[in-house]
Image (tube, helix red, strand yellow):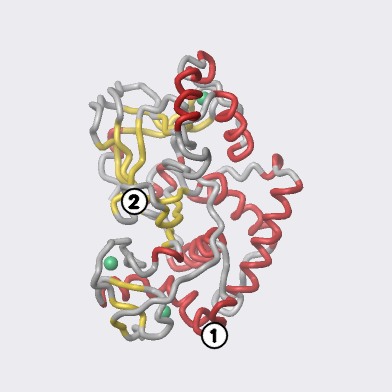
């Protein structure tokens, strides 16, 4: 996987720490690289419509014979997902409506398990290891601190029977903070929220409000595509936030979620602010949807009831 990553390299970006740099030319529209998810989780509300393993949308999904919640394309998809699904399958049966960890907690549980079953470098970590993610623990305010404590408590509550030796509070505080700053929400073509994931090599890119790539998803694979010409030596910039908003709004959001003050050309020149204010007046309520979001991850706690064919659990 991670095709095309040979055209880029990790480097030290002036003023922003590590980043991603092009070592060859990319044309607008060209795939810069694709990165499989290190860990991912399908959002609860999309369970009936998408395969829990490959995120395919189809009508003829089979459901897990045990929990009747998870759906799959076929036995192969179910088998591939079983290591992760077994963290939830039995608990969902036992707890019913009371089983409601947030999507972030579900993702972190999967990351902990993945780190145990695959201790070697993952194909999604060609240039950046998940363990290298910034946590910005020193910048957490009391509100974030409280959320972090709640996440840790929920992880223990919902997963302690299924993960032996859950890491200590210090390690979990750091892991949740890392995932909040570096996680991605996966969306379909209509920008409907499908799930949450971590893509270490994609997280290596620094932010710009005038990015030269966009991230889209094919199943659970992130595709980084040039949206204008990129020359060898150029830094590859992604946007972490919705760019519909004027400079002050963007700056506030970046500072709050990612702890940095954006100094990109767009934030300095504010050249598009007037047009953005106009668009904003015309559009539906702001902030309703996060485009190409790079965390923080959403909270989610309701489930539908599924009908359909069933599959037996793999042993
Ligand atoms: Zn599938
Ligand atoms: Zn199940
Ligand atoms: Zn900016």
Q: Nearer the viewer, residue 13 or 297?
A: 297
Up/down of 216 relative to 70, above or below = above
Marker disc for residue 132? none
Q: Secondary structure at mark 1?
A: helix
Tell whether 4 sits left or right of 141: left
Residue in view at x 47 percent, y 43 percent? 290
Q: Earlier in the sequence, mark 2 or mark 1?
A: 1
Up/down of 158 relative to 39, above or below = below
Q: Nearer the viewer, residue 96 or 215?
A: 96
Residue bearing mark 1: 94
Q: How crowded is the residue under tag 1: few (<14 C-alpha within 10 Å), some, or many (20+)?
A: few
Up/down of 216 relative to 231, above or below = below
Q: Quadrant of the C terminus?
A: bottom left
Tell whether 147 sits left or right of 121: right
Q: Position of residue 155 (x, y in %)?
A: 61, 67
Up/down of 298 relative to 303, above or below = above
Quadrant of res 8: top left
Q: Position of residue 227 (x, y in %)?
A: 30, 29
Residue bearing mark 2: 188
Q: Nearer the viewer, residue 173 or 241?
A: 241
Question: Closer to the observer: label 2 or label 1?
Answer: 2
* Figure quadrant, ligand 1: bottom left
């Amino acid at each position: 996987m991670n095709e095309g990553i040979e055209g880029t390299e990790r480097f030290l970006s002036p003023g922003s720490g590590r980043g991603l740099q092009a070592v060859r030319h990319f044309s607008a529209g060209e795939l810069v690289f694709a990165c499989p998810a290190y860990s991912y989780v399908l959002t609860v509300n999309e369970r009936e419509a998408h395969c829990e393993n490959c995120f395919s949308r189809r009508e003829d999904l089979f459901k897990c014979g045990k929990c009747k919640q998870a759906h799959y394309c076929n036995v192969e998809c179910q088998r591939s997902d079983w290591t992760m699904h077994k963290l939830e399958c039995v608990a969902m049966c036992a707890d019913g409506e009371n089983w409601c960890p947030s999507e972030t907690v579900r993702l972190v549980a999967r990351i902990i398990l993945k780190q145990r079953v695959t201790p070697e470098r993952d194909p999604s970590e060609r240039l950046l290891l998940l363990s290298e993610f910034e946590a910005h623990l020193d910048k957490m305010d009391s509100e974030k601190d409280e959320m972090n404590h709640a996440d840790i408590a929920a992880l223990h509550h919902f997963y302690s029977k299924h993960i032996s030796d859950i890491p200590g509070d210090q390690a979990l505080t750091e892991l949740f903070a890392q995932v909040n700053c570096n996680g991605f929400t996966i969306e379909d073509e209509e920008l409907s929220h499908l799930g949450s994931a971590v893509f270490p090599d994609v997280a290596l890119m620094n932010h710009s409000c005038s990015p030269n790539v966009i991230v889209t998803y094919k199943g659970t694979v992130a595709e980084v595509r040039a949206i204008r010409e990129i020359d060898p030596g150029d830094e590859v910039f992604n946007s972490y936030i919705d760019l519909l908003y004027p400079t002050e709004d963007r700056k506030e959001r970046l500072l709050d979620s990612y702890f940095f003050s954006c100094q990109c050309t767009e934030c300095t020149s504010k050249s598009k602010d007037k047009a953005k204010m106009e668009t904003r007046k015309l559009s539906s309520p702001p902030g309703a949807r996060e485009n190409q979001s790079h965390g923080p991850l959403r909270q989610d706690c309701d489930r539908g009831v599924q009908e359909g064919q069933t599959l037996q659990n793999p042993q």
